[in-house]
Image (cartoon, coloured by chain):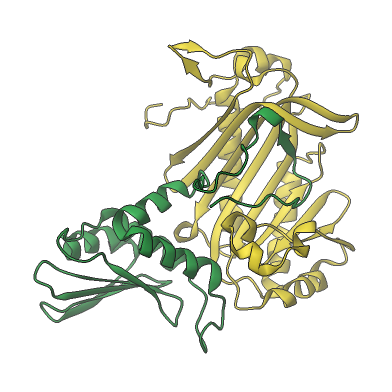
Chain colours: A green, B yellow
Amino acid sequence: MTTLSLPTKSPAYTLEEGLREPAAASSVRRGAPDEWAREELLLRKLGPKGWGRVYQFRNYYESGWGDKGRVLSPRALDAFFRFLEEATFPAAKSTPSVFLTDRGGIELCWEDRNGKSMQVEFTGTGAEFYKAATDEEGSVAFDGLGQLSHRLSA
Amino acid sequence: MSDGFPIQIPDRLPVHIDPCPIVQAIFETRFVSPQPWATMPGLLFAQIREKYPEQKTLPMAQLPEELRRQDPALLILPLIQFLSDNFLIQLGPRVVSLVTRPNAYPGWSAIAQELNWLLERLKVAGFVGETERLSSRYIDFFGGDIFTALRLGLQINDQPLRGTQTDVTTILRRDAMSIRLQATNGAIVATKEGPTSGSVLDLDAWFGSLDVDLFGNGLARFAEAHHAIKGLFFGLIKPELLSKLNPTYE
């Protein structure tokens, strides 16, 4: 997948011909330098399906999607990535699923080693979680995401 | 370098250099909005028309929205410009930026004053929801090969690569700030004398959504990013180039 190259505006500078992107290669998509790490993280932890769903949530769901759905909160997305960086999911189980919630949050669901459900919804203010094995639920602020990730995904 | 950051920032930074290599400085906020795009230009123009009476639709606006969605890089491009004598304001469905006029850098105090004014106007316009990313970006142009004047370069077999077209891009992290550093010796820049080839140093420093709120700490974050870029610039250039820029200190 390559990007199209229509003239967008007068850029401050252009690269000389030899340094420009080579002709489109249909099988190669070069990630933006500041996004590469996140894309790699998504592919590694959630697989191509999860990567594709997050891409859709970010780019295709505007305010008012569905009926009264809110646009994906950038804070929720950053919190989601912060959690994902620290998370380790059971290898034998299916890849975690990801959902966009009505209030603009992003929800991650997976099964623990015993097949019990785990859910974390990331919102503009933090994260809310549910652990079916112990019927435990709660919420954490952004600074507690790393700890929550270790606790739930260990 | 004691904190693990690879570039040594000088303790004392100049307050003025001449000639000034800055082609353009861009102060950008990406955001999400509860408002549809169609209403945003009108809401903003109503607030800024006294200072920015002229507006220009950018070519990207002609591209169907469905096509723009297929590439995240296109989604965050501005679609319309508002122009004043000293600055441009650019607006898109997810982005608003204050841009200096090409090759006419007005200095940080003038920029800070304009940013402060723009933030007040944006707040009244009411369409900016949550902040996604806030950045300061400086694009500098130099005649000749910048890699001979930078403490940065590409090596092959432990030898500096010289005399070839080179483009280096890397991402650095410093606390909550991310910095994209791009250096190229194969750039073409529009000047008053026409297109000129040479080198560009392009520094973009930004904060993510968890560390910024445009109407809270936005101005302070712009200043922080500006200061970081200034430090990086003077940390990257070698003394020979610095002396050619005739620095003055407080």
Q: Residue furthest bottom?
A: A67
Horizontal and vertical percent position of residue B182: 58, 34
Residue B131 falls in which quadrant of the image?
bottom right
Q: Quick check: can you spot residue B35?
A: yes
Horizontal and vertical percent position of residue B232: 56, 31
> Can you say whether B2 is above or below B213 in the image?
above
Quadrant location of the C terminus of chain B in the rendered image: top right
Question: Which residue is found at the position 59% from the left and 50% from the top?
Answer: B135
Given residues B27 and B118, the one toward you in this image is: B27
Given residues B28 and A23, the one toward you in this image is: A23
Question: Which residue is found at the position 85% from the left and 56% from the top?
Answer: B83
Question: Which residue is found at the position 60% from the left and 73% from the top?
Answer: B33
> Can you say whether B48 is above or below B169 in the image?
below
Instruction: Answer with left or right where residue B60 lies relative to residue A109.
Output: right
Given residues B15 and A148, the one toward you in this image is: A148
Horizontal and vertical percent position of residue B112: 70, 50
> Can you say whether B229 is above or below B244 in the image?
below
Horizontal and vertical percent position of residue A75: 45, 65
Question: Which residue is found at the position 10% from the left and 78% from the top?
Answer: A134
Residue B244 falls in which quadrant of the image?
top right
Quadrant location of the N terminus of chain B in the rendered image: top left
Q: Residue furthest front?
A: A26
How many numbered callouts?
Answer: 0
Q: Quick check: can you spot residue B130?
A: no
